[in-house]
Amino acid sequence: MPHNTQRISEDIKREISASIRELGDERLDGAFAAVSRCEVSNELSHCKIYISAHGGEEKTQEIVAVLQGAAGFFKKRINGRIKMRKIPELKFIPDNTLDYYDKISGIIESSKRAQDIAAGGPPADSTKRGTDNVTSD
């Protein structure tokens, strides 16, 4: 990606991120949505905006649909703050990286617990820290 498109991508990402909080759509209340990355085409006519959200794929799809419906709002915000001859068409795309990370973290944690139990020790998340596990006969 040429330097100019990288800079524009970062500027658009920053503007979209700030504007999501100001959108005021009740369907986004209580939702965590973040722009994970932004890719502008070399001719600056298209922009892919990847959205991450907690709550699973279905929730992410719902948030993406809301944001896509507000593309005009975002284009006006970009036009007012970023100096460009033409504002690119915005395409919001779900990015399920956060869900994937949560899933992998859960697998790693359960593997650690299983290893601790197999080794004869207490699970890694045991709340009985600092106590002796001595039994009397």
Image (spheres, rainbow, N blue to C red):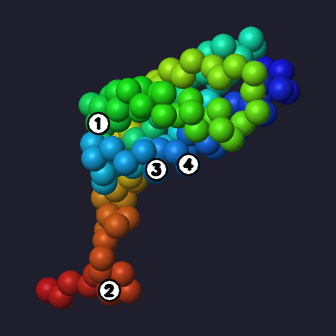
Tell me the kind of residue under disc 3. Answer: Glu
Badge 4 marks a residue whose secondary structure is helix
Query: How many residues crowd mark 1 within 10 Å: few (<14), some (14–19), many (20+)?
Result: some
Disc 2 is placed on an element classified as loop
**Label 1, on which residue?**
59
Q: Is residue 89 left or right of residue 24?
A: right
* Mark 2 vs mark 3, CA separation in Å: 54 Å
> What residue is drawn where x is 65% and y is 32%?
79
Residue 1 point in image, percent of width and height: 78, 20
Badge 3 vs badge 4, beta-carbon distance below 8 Å: yes
**Residue at 66 percent of width and 13 percent of height:** 45
Where is mark 4, residue-wise?
Answer: 18
Q: Read off the residue under disc 3.
A: 22
Does the rendering let one see residue 88? yes
16 lies left or right of 133 = right
Q: Residue at x 30, y 76 (%)?
A: 127
**SS type, badge 1:** helix
Q: Tell me which numbered mark, 3 or 1, is placed earlier along the sequence.
A: 3
Mark 3: secondary structure: helix
The image quadrant where one finds the C terminus is bottom left
From the viewer's side, name the closer residue of 1 and 47.
47
Amino acid type of the residue tagged 4 in the rendering: Ala
Residue in front for this viewpoint, 58 or 67: 67
